[in-house]
Image (cartoon, grey):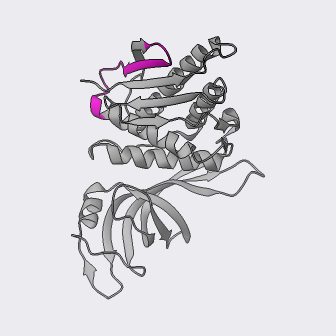
Amino acid sequence: MRPELSIKLEYLQNRNNPAEVFEAMALYINAYRDLGQLLTNSVGLKTDFNFQLNDIEKGSILSKLSAMSTKIDSMLENAFYSSGNSLFQELTTVSEISSENQVEGLAAGLETTLSDKLDREIADPYIDRQNLAHVLNSFSSANQKVQPGENVFLISGNNSKQLCSINTAWRFTGKPKEMFQGKTVSHEHRDKLYVKVSVNEGNSVWSFRSISIDKRFNARIVHKDWLQRYQSGLVPAIGPKDIIEADISYDVYTPPKGKGQPQIRNARIKFVVDVKRNNGHQYEL
């Protein structure tokens, strides 16, 4: 049975302008469709993400939807819904998103959550930052149609317990068309890295310092075989003075003049070549 996404809007009885309830539901459905498309694109699938409406329940409005494309299987749908829930849970802690750095943080979190939910054979996800800003703006527009005291919930999969409450007071106040207009230059090379923060479970980002460029940055290790061996204890723990030799890729994003300093983004540890131990021994991986 394919997973469903249900969007439930509990509206006030006798509210003014009741048509806004239906407008809000339509906006949430369209915004989630765009989020699904963003996530579909992030793993390299060349297909459209669209919903079909399966059912509507009265009282509070509850729309039950399922993805239409046969190219998106139930595993991917569940991964997308879980990632969407993680995004909305993160937005419960803030009242407003406005800056590129905030969108960057949400994108990195989405990539990590999605990577955790995907089979290891699937391409490492990359979230288009400007498109994410457009998606956030769409959800914010839907929120503006909801009155205080009304509630919106997402129920993902076929399990009613997988319920996520949307922070309808949250707003996106940035200008998507004006965001991420700086210059991005991609780099890929072999480097030697100190590990500042390692991750012993899951696919969350590690913190490194590069010897060649003398900069600190966060990156996810996409060499999954090595990561699995490290996290299972087959590779000894990496100390603060040990050096990882690895093939890495990253983008250097330079914002428009007067809007900040260059930043390293979208960093990936693509292949771990060796770990050089400070004790003088070298472990072959």
**Vertical order, 44 against 62 (above or below):** below
**What is the quadrant of the C terminus in the image?**
bottom left
Q: Is residue 68 magenta?
A: yes
Q: Residue at x 42, y 40 (%)?
A: 83
Q: Is residue 14 left or right of residue 125?
A: right
| Visible residue check, residue 127 | no
Q: Residue at x 28, y 28 (%)?
A: 73
Q: Is residue 106 left or right of residue 269?
A: right
**Vertical order, 272 against 154 (above or below):** below
Q: In this rendered view, identify the residue nearer to me: 20 or 99.
A: 20
Q: In this rendered view, identify the residue nearer to me: 60 or 255.
A: 60
Q: Which residue is outermost to the bottom?
A: 279
Query: Quadrant location of residue 175?
Result: top right
**Vertical order, 260 against 111 (above or below):** below
| Visible residue check, residue 155 | yes
Q: In this rendered view, identify the residue nearer to me: 47 or 206.
A: 206
x, y percent for residue 179: 67, 40
Query: Quadrant location of residue 11?
Result: top right
x, y percent for residue 120: 27, 47
**What is the quadrant of the N terminus in the image?**
top left
Q: Residue at x 59, y 27 (%)?
A: 150
Query: Quadrant location of residue 47?
Result: top left
The magenta segment is: 57-75
x, y percent for residue 207: 47, 66
Q: Which residue is outermost to the left?
A: 234
x, y percent for residue 81: 40, 34
**Vertical order, 80 against 10 (above or below):** below
Q: Which residue is outermost to the right?
A: 258
Q: Is residue 194 magenta?
A: no
Q: In this rendered view, identify the residue nearer to me: 96 or 100.
A: 96
Q: How many marks?
A: 0
